[in-house]
Amino acid sequence: MPRIRVGIIGVGNCASALVQGVYYYKERGDCEGLIHCDIGGYKVWDIEFVAAVDIGSNKVGKDLSEAIFAPPNITPRIADVPRLGVTVVRGPVLDGVAPHMVEVFKPAEGRDPTVDEVADALREADVVVNLLPVGSEKATRFYAEAALRARAAFVNGIPVFIASDPSGEWPRRYAEAGLPLLGDDVKGQVGATITHRTLVALLRDRGVKVEGTYQLNIGGNTDFLNMLLEERLVSKRISKTRAVTSLLDYGRKLEEGGGVRIGPSDYVPFLGNTKVAYMYIKARSFAGFPLTIDVKLTVDDKSMCAAVLSDVVRVAKVALDRGEAGAIPEASAWYFKHPPVQAKSDAEARRWLEEWLAGRRVSEAKPQPVAGE
Ligand SMILES: NC(=O)c1ccc[n+]([C@@H]2O[C@H](COP(=O)([O-])OP(=O)(O)OC[C@H]3O[C@@H](n4cnc5c(N)ncnc54)[C@H](O)[C@@H]3O)[C@@H](O)[C@H]2O)c1
């Protein structure tokens, strides 16, 4: 029986949706709602959870099957998750908890473990998935190091630039260790980023000039509560903005001229895991005539994340099986907002992935640092 052993960093709402999703599909035995049913011979129900790290006093010490439902998590029960025999262990707090979040992410008693102790806890994992709060720059680097020492592939779900590290250092270290690295910042199944990109690519391909655009996102979970602090959003804004502006030759100029505003915008508690994204584009078409697009997208934020992760974990295992190491731009462009190399459209990103899955590297997706960051 093929299996993929996964370690989770940050047992929040995304992790809950991922863990439950695996058991949801295990029970149903079909693939409705998944991006891919089969990836390199792996089905979503081949995923097994073998390690979990968090800092929350409500989560540390519990079995993962219970911790995914512990407050402040609010992801509803969509599957019966059996006792997994995986105890959530305490990680170091570092910069994972913003000052206004200490009540909701109340750290469990005890000292911060060393990187080798966390690596030890991750030792059984083939793939480690990072799902820390936005702004966890130091903590993400700590866990990327721990995964490397545990000899696991690393999937970075959040906007800290590891797979797209502009210095190339993390991809180089993973390449030298013979381990795959995928990221950065999950691009939800049909979230605001891929919808916004699709609209902008449509205008570009039909010769329409974008003059200004915004994407305002609101939600009511801890992810949105955490993102109220603008200082923690620097890389999130870069990640979400570049995902859109990279499609246009004049994208950077548009940004510099104040023509783009994209990012998490407010916390509305009663929305829970529902995320609402408002996207607006003003543009000029034939002979300078104005054109505007105004879109409201409403989704369950965490299912969007889990759908992508349930693919990416399998992609990471395929890379491990093939002995591919370092950043894998062909596979990251379709699944992440800030990959090592952005494709010129999501159709192209998908083609890169399919080519790579068929065993071919894609020359346009050659690893290169993201300019100017
Ligand atoms: N559609 C999506 O949901 C989506 C898309 C892209 C990226 N992301 C990112 O994925 C990440 C996870 O999202 P979420 O909704 O699950 O967040 P969450 O707030 O529900 O969970 C974060 C978890 O990390 C834990 N944590 C905090 N500091 C830690 C540390 N130092 N070590 C270990 N654990 C720590 C918290 O206790 C909490 O359980 C966020 O950064 C989010 O922005 C989500």
Image: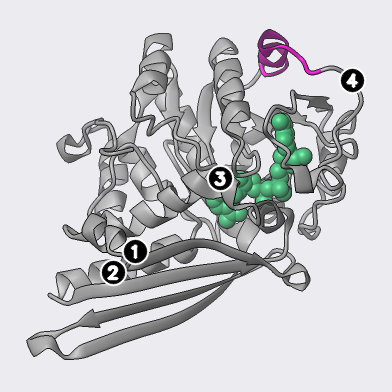
State how far apart marks 1 and 2 are (Cα).
Answer: 5 Å
Residue 42 visible within the image: no
Which residue lies under the disc numbered 2? 200
The foreground one among 136 and 150 is 136
**Quadrant location of residue 135?**
top right
Describe residue 248's horizontal placement relative to residue 242 as left or right. left
Dot placed on the residue nearer the N-terminal end, 1 or 3: 1
Number of numbered discs: 4
Which quadrant of the figure contains the C terminus? top left
Which residue lies under the disc numbered 3? 310
Query: Is residue 114 one of those drawn in magenta?
Result: yes
Dot placed on the residue nearer the N-terminal end, 2 or 3: 2
Q: Nearer the viewer, mark 1 or mark 4?
A: 4
Describe residue 350's horizontal placement relative to residue 49 as left or right. left
Q: Residues within 10 Å of mark 2 (few under 14, many from 20)?
A: many
Disc assigned to residue 197: 1
Describe residue 362's horizontal placement relative to residue 13 as left or right. left
Query: Is residue 107 one of those drawn in magenta?
Result: no
Describe residue 281's horizontal placement relative to residue 56 as left or right. left
Farthest residue in the left direction? 287
Which residue lies under the disc numbered 4? 110
Residue 346 visible within the image: yes
